[in-house]
Image: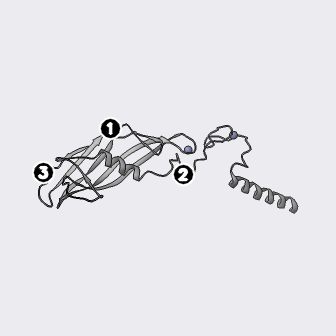
Amino acid sequence: MRLDVSKLKSNGDSEEFEFCENWEKIEFRGDNLFFVEPVSFYGVATKKGNVIEVSGNIKTKLKTSCYRCAEDTFVDVDVPFYEEYSNNAEIKDDEVIQFENDVIEFDENVIATIVLYLPMKYLCREDCKGLCPICGTNLNFGSCSCERDEIDPRLSILKTLKNMLDTDEKKEV
Ligand SMILES: [Zn+2]
Ligand SMILES: [Zn+2]
């Protein structure tokens, strides 16, 4: 995704752009995320003094694995993009990205923006029950007879409560 900004000469000059490319995947925090839709990036580049302000929007869809059950999980990406660029080497500002000649190369910043908005954990659905740690059954699709109480403290609390209730009921009878 390369934008030729040689036409942006005077303050206020701007140019709209639109890219749509097929990318393969990104690796982030040890996960592979595959692009299952083209990466669409559109926006506007505006010359403001010595910098070129670029604002826009990135849209695509990624496929990865659910953190709990390892099933395919999709992440919709629809995020804003904003960066400042300059090809003037005298601009010493960490926030301003340097580029050479008249062409801004966006790929790296587009990826950086996408990962900025990724969730901490990918889940196939909010309430994914995950896999049984003993037999590996996907608990979203079925149950197993493993005794898992000690592994999930929340379940064991529930069971204790249930036992207490059961006992109370028996007393009443
Ligand atoms: Zn899951
Ligand atoms: Zn099991």
Residue 92, position as x, y percentages in the image = 25, 59
Q: Nearer the viewer, mark 3 or mark 2?
A: 3
Amino acid, disc 1: Asn
Residue 132, position as x, y percentages in the image = 66, 42
Kindly tell me whether residue 173 is visible in this rendering: no
Kindly tell me whether residue 140 is visible in this rendering: yes
Q: Residues within 10 Å of mark 1 (few under 14, many from 20)?
A: few
Q: Residues within 10 Å of mark 2 (few under 14, many from 20)?
A: few
Residue 130, position as x, y percentages in the image = 60, 44
Residue at the disc numbered 3: 7
Identify the image quadrant of the N terminus.
Answer: top left
Mark toward the start of the polypeptide (2 vs 1): 1
Mark toward the start of the polypeptide (3 vs 2): 3
Q: Residues within 10 Å of mark 3 (few under 14, many from 20)?
A: few
Residue at the disc numbered 2: 126
Residue at the disc numbered 1: 22
Q: Nearer the viewer, mark 2 or mark 1?
A: 1
Amino acid, disc 3: Lys
Residue appearing at x 17%, y 61% in the figure: 49
